[in-house]
Amino acid sequence: MEGGGGSGNKTTGGLAGFFGAGGAGYSHADLAGVPLTGMNPLSPYLNVDPRYLVQDTDEFILPTGANKTRGRFELAFFTIGGCCMTGAAFGAVNGLRLGLKETQNMAWSKPRNVQILNMVTRQGALWANTLGSLALLYSAFGVIIEKTRGAEDDLNTVAAGTMTGMLYKCTGGLRGAARGGLAGLTLTSLYALYNNWEHMKGSLLHQSL
């Protein structure tokens, strides 16, 4: 029995030594003089200073002069493509609704299916073209204003939206341009307010305290 116990201890010690856990352990007296790094003491199990495990810098390398966030020019492609796809999807649904409404007195047949399909295609292309054009104008104005001012903030968003609405509706004269600019100003102002809502709420709460 004693031999078995000794063999077991030798096996355990061998495995512990193989994994680096063997040798003398840390006592309370040894740990009492360990310096603290912030609030984390030196790990007695890993023997690694926790300071080397903290990532104080970014985990990616940026090119010289590049910003940490994407600018309006980089986001323009996503904005235009997303608006085109959204317009196509909305137009397809709207075309299906209109097609079913206009052919409700017709029996289910090939002419009715063709008419519904034509309506879906027409409405999808119309809405995709409309939203894509608006996104293109908005992105172009946004990039121009950003490069002119040398800053990126909500003022660029509101100004780009206002100018987009005015240019898109300029064919209707001054009154149409004014209505388009007002619509763009309203939509972009609501968007800017939504983006800064948490910051504004935190500022108001801090002032109330």
Image (spheres, rainbow, N blue to C red):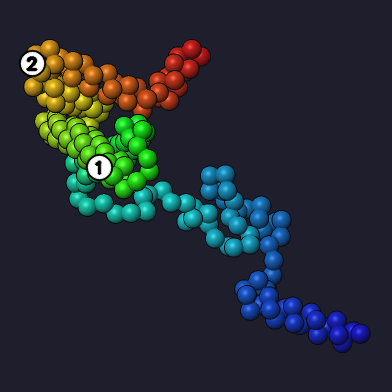
Mark 2 neighbour density, 10 Å: few (under 14) some (14–19) many (20 or more): few
Kindly identify which residue carries mark 2. 173
Residue 136 spot, x, y in % from top left = 17, 37
Name the residue nearer the viewer: 21 or 122. Answer: 122
The residue sitting at the bottom extreme is: 3
Which residue is drawn at the image coordinates 70% and 56% (left, top)? Answer: 29
> Seen in the image, is 106 located left or right of residue 118?
right
Q: Is residue 71 above or below residue 26?
A: above
At label 1, counting other C-alpha atoms closer than 10 Å, the crowd grade (few under 14, some 14-19, many 20 or more) is some
The amino acid type found where label 2 is placed reads Gly
Q: Which residue is mark 1?
A: 118
Query: Residue placed at 18% from the left, 19% from the top?
Result: 180
| Three-letter residue code for mark 1 | Asn
In the image shown, does 31 or 3 lie closer to the viewer?
Answer: 3
Res 183 visible: yes
> Hey, which quadrant is residue 111 in on the image?
top left
Q: Position of residue 138 (x, y in %)?
A: 18, 32
Q: Is residue 27 left or right of residue 143?
A: right
Residue 192 image point, x, y percent: 31, 25
Instruction: Identify which residue is drawn at 71% across, 56% down.
Output: 28
